[in-house]
């Protein structure tokens, strides 16, 4: 197993971005950067942890970032039996209402995908006070990095999926609908095919800003009106077309935070656009289940039920079959 970390900074000048290799022993990010490039090296201390969007005051299971994303790579090496093997890659975007990134929806999911013989990545993207399209640019740059390093990392270059939970599902779906838009190309200086995801895995995603929307997510995403893009534009059921890659999506019927109608609205838009979709709606389960098992359980006494829901645990086996079919 090989572990790597990269700091992704967008908004470098008027266009472009910078990706810096963080040595695992120091997690530094100073110096040695390359503007407009998708790889570089660095050493020193991670100054982004002390930015205005730092982790002060947040529980340990919540990570807030501003001014740069942290991409953690979990890479399996090939065995002598299959020295030329290529794997699918899954980039995980945890939820957190665009206020923070939940650790429950990061590393535990990564190890599930590793067990499926995928290469796994966790993106702790910029959240409040960062606004759209900062996190989207970071995710697009991460896809481009992985596609460029596909040979070295034993990855199928056309087998890169993005997995998102809750607001991270909105981020993943945003790349699915916006990867070929001019505003993203102009900001990053990348060609659309470099940023294109090959599949979307959406777990109880935030989709709509309308009647069934999660208002806090859109407040954070737009900076309550500071972003140049409207809440209506970011209501993703309105942005679906044939450009969207195949989608695997699951939700619970009793989600009281992000109603199941978010997934249903997206599913209907996908059907109208003739986009491949596998949709699972479970009869029970609160919001934020992650793996829905003991590993991602947490102690809560809010009357909304447990985070361990056996009927929902099948989603990981179902998505494994879906990934193989891509």
Image: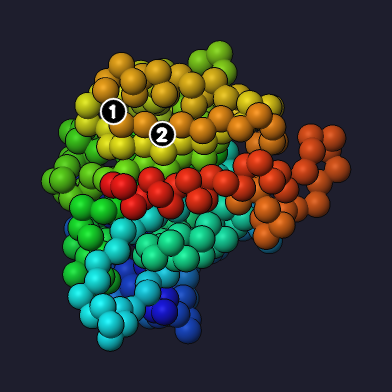
Q: On residue 278, which mark appears?
A: 2
Q: Is residue 251 above or below residue 123?
A: above
Q: Is residue 226 above or below residue 45?
A: above
- Which residue is disc 1 drawn over? 275
Query: Which one is nearer the viewer's eye here, 117 or 48?
Result: 117
Q: Is residue 135 visible?
A: no
- Across and down, in percent, residue 282 comes to 61, 32
Q: Which of the 4 image quadrants contains residue 236?
A: top left
Q: Which of the 4 image quadrants contains residue 149?
A: bottom left
Residue furthest top in the image: 211
Q: Is residue 236 left or right of residue 286?
A: left
Q: Is residue 262 above or below residue 132?
A: above
Residue drawn at x 79%, y 38% as measured from the top left: 305
- Across and down, in percent, residue 185 comes to 18, 41
Q: On residue 94, which mark appears?
A: none
Query: Which one is nearer the viewer's eye here, 100 or 300?
Result: 300
């Amino acid at each position: 197993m090989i572990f790597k970390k990269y700091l992704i900074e967008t908004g470098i000048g008027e266009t472009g971005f910078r990706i810096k290799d963080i040595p695992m022993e120091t997690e530094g990010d100073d110096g040695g950067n390359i503007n407009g490039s998708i790889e570089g090296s660095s050493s020193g201390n991670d100054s982004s942890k002390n930015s205005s969007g730092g982790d002060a005051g947040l529980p340990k299971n919540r990570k807030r970032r501003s001014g740069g994303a942290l991409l953690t790579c979990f890479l399996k090496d090939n065995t002598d039996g299959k020295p030329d093997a290529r794997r699918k890659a899954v980039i995980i975007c945890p939820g957190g209402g665009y206020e923070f990134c939940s650790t429950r929806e990061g590393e535990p999911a990564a190890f599930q995908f590793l067990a499926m013989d995928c290469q796994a990545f966790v993106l702790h993207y910029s959240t409040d006070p960062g606004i759209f399209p900062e996190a989207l640019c970071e995710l697009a740059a991460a896809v481009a990095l992985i596609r460029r390093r596909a040979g070295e990392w034993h990855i199928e270059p056309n087998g890169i999926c993005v997995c998102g939970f809750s607001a991270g599902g909105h981020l993943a779906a945003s790349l699915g609908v916006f990867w070929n838009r001019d505003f993203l190309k102009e900001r990053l200086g990348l060609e659309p095919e470099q940023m294109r995801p090959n599949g979307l895995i959406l777990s109880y995603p935030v989709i709509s800003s309308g009647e069934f929307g999660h208002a806090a997510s859109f407040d954070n995403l737009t900076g309550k009106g500071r972003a140049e893009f409207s809440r209506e534009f970011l209501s993703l059921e309105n942005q679906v077309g044939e450009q969207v890659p195949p989608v695997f999506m699951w939700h619970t019927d009793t989600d009281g935070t992000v109603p199941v109608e978010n997934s249903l609205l997206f599913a209907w838009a996908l059907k109208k656009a003739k986009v491949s979709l596998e949709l699972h709606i479970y009869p029970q389960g609160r919001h934020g289940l992650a793996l829905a098992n003991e590993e991602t359980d947490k102690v809560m006494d809010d009357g909304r039920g447990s985070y361990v829901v056996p009927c929902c645990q099948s989603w990981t086996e179902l998505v494994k079959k879906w990934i193989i079919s891509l």
